[in-house]
Image (cartoon, rainbow, N blue to C red):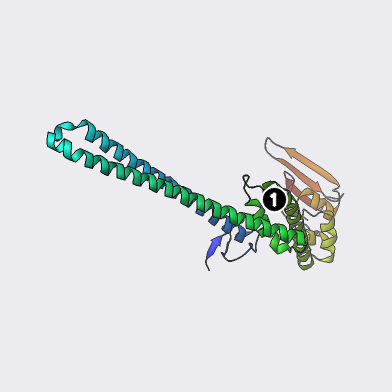
């Protein structure tokens, strides 16, 4: 086991975790996809290098034949009648050998492609059977989705796989939404007071700490004008000063001016009682 950085929140987590415990990012599926991409890239690179090597060898043979045909001054009349047929036989044998190697490489590539298609087809059939059974658990949805996404356009199952994929993606979204709602509910129960829950129900974009503080009738530097107004009510008077980049406000909270709140661009910067 080793530690890696989560691509979403950049925190260090175990490479064996299925999801990031901090942000919920699907680590296991991400690593599997990354590994598959690396294997595919390595295969493409191997095929490219093999093709380039074969081309280089054919070029070398072609240049050798050309040199043997054009450079007659290096051979005597006896050599040209005796050695030339042997040379051409050797060159022909080499040429046939390279053709055989190229054909073998193509056969191996086609065989690997057929094996990959067979694996993808088996994965699609397994995913389809699991979905039709109606017993697909939430934990299995990501694997089903990966199997459906692996079906290629050239395969006859592609259209059906895309139709099933739409339904699976919708179900995954519903599961994820419910999971987040449950986590948020658990956090609310753990971190919000009774009064804080009442404030949070009206302002779900406010932090739990701010909701608890507002429920106590308190304010602090960093609150927004809406949060201060929710806590202490409307001010008796507002004095404004505007510049090119800043708008400052002084809220006089009571008629007799014994409590002031100061804002810069809508954010509380000072409190004076």
Q: Secondary structure at mark 1?
A: helix
Compared across the picture, whether 112 is left or right of 193 comes to: left
Which of these two is toward me, 219 or 39?
A: 39
Q: Reply above or below: 268 against 29.
A: above
Query: Residue 98 appears in which quarter of the rendering?
Result: top left
Instruction: Specify whether residue 220 is in view.
Output: no
Q: Residue at x 14, y 38 (%)?
A: 79
Instruction: Specify whether residue 186 is in view.
Output: yes
Q: Residues within 10 Å of mark 1 (few under 14, many from 20)?
A: many
Q: Reply above or below: 191 against 128.
A: below
Compared across the picture, whether 197 is left or right of 25 comes to: right
Image quadrant for the C terminus?
bottom right
Which of these two is toward me, 269 or 36?
A: 36
Q: Residue at x 70, y 63 (%)?
A: 139
Which of these two is toward me, 223 or 135?
A: 135
Q: Residue at x 66, y 47 (%)?
A: 156
Compared across the picture, whether 161 is left or right of 79 comes to: right
- Residue 206 in the image: state x and y as whole percent: 77, 55
Q: Residue at x 69, y 50 (%)?
A: 161
- Residue 6 in the image: state x and y as whole percent: 59, 58
Q: Reply above or below: 184 against 72.
A: below
Which residue, given by chain and number where applicable, does mark 1 sit on? Answer: 161
Which of these two is toward me, 233 or 178?
A: 178
Compared across the picture, whether 95 is left or right of 247 comes to: left
Query: Residue 25 appears in which quarter of the rendering?
Result: bottom right
């Amino acid at each position: 086991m080793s530690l890696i950085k989560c691509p979403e929140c950049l925190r260090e987590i175990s490479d064996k975790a299925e999801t990031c415990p901090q942000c919920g990012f699907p680590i296991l599926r991400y690593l599997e996809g990354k590994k598959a991409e690396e294997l595919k890239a390595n295969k493409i690179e191997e095929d490219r290098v093999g093709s380039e090597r074969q081309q280089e060898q054919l070029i070398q043979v072609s240049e050798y034949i050309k040199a043997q045909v054009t450079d007659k001054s290096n051979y005597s009349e006896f050599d040209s009648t005796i050695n030339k047929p042997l040379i051409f036989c050797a060159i022909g044998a080499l040429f046939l050998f390279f053709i055989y190697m190229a054909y073998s490489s193509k056969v191996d590539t086609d065989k690997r492609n057929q094996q990959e298609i067979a694996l993808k087809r088996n994965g699609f059939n397994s995913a389809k059977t699991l979905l039709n059974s109606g017993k697909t658990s939430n934990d299995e949805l990501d694997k089903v989705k990966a199997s459906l996404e692996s079906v290629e356009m050239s395969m006859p199952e592609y259209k059906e796989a895309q139709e099933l994929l739409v339904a699976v993606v919708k179900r995954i979204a519903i599961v994820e939404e419910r999971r987040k709602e449950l986590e948020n509910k658990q956090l609310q129960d753990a971190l919000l007071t009774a009064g804080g829950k009442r404030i949070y129900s009206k302002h779900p974009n406010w932090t739990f700490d701010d909701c608890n503080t507002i429920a106590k009738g308190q304010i602090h530097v960093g609150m927004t004008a809406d949060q201060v107004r929710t806590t202490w009510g409307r001010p008796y008077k507002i004095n404004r000063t505007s510049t090119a980049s800043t708008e400052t406000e002084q809220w006089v909270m009571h008629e007799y001016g014994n409590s002031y709140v100061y804002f810069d661009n809508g954010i509380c910067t000072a409190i004076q009682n």
